[in-house]
Amino acid sequence: MDKRPEDTTVAEAAQELLRDVKIYIYLLQEAEMIAKRAEKMSAKEFIAKKQVLMINAVNSIPLGARSCPYCLGYSMNCQDCPYGEEKGLCTEENSVYSDIKKAQLVLLEKLRDYALR
């Protein structure tokens, strides 16, 4: 069975995914530090720290082309991409990727307004 272009880049995409999600280890450590200091924090201070963690977590969702075997396998030639054919080209307004990015932006906007002033 011949490998398709996206199959040849899975390992590369997986390594990038691993690098992308390592931020969550840092976020876990930050959450542990917040928990240890919680008794000395006001609710307002806690919410502000929690807000930063949530924004960092949402910003760290691995959506980039470097962790996509299709983007890598087709060298960003979206017109030949089978994922884009099925789910819509990532650059198109109503593709799955575009919808996820829009939802991420809406969530980030709401999170920026989460903490008290």
Image: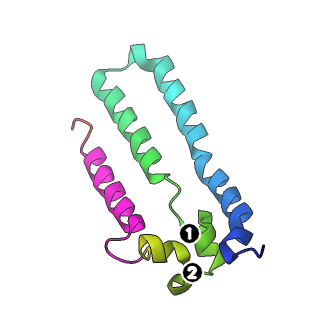
The answer to whether residue 60 is left or right of residue 21 is left
| Within-10-Å neighbours for mark 1: few <14, some 14–19, many 20+ | some
Q: Is residue 39 above or below residue 62?
A: above
Q: Dividing the image into 4 quarters, which one contains the N terminus? A: bottom right
The answer to whether residue 32 is left or right of residue 11 is left
Marked residue nearer the N-terminal end (2 or 1): 1
Residue contact between numbered discs 2 and 1, judged by CB atoms under 8 Å: yes
**x and y, in percent, of residue 42 in the image:** 31, 20
Cα gap from disc 2 to disc 1, whole angstroms: 8 Å
Q: Is residue 64 above or below residue 39?
A: below
Quarter of the view holding residue 40? top left
Q: Which residue is mark 2?
A: 76
Amino acid at the residue labelled 2: Met
* Residue shown at 42% from the left, 66% from the top: 97
Quarter of the view holding residue 49? top left
Which is nearer the eye, 65 or 28? 65
* Residue shown at 55% from the left, 85% from the top: 80
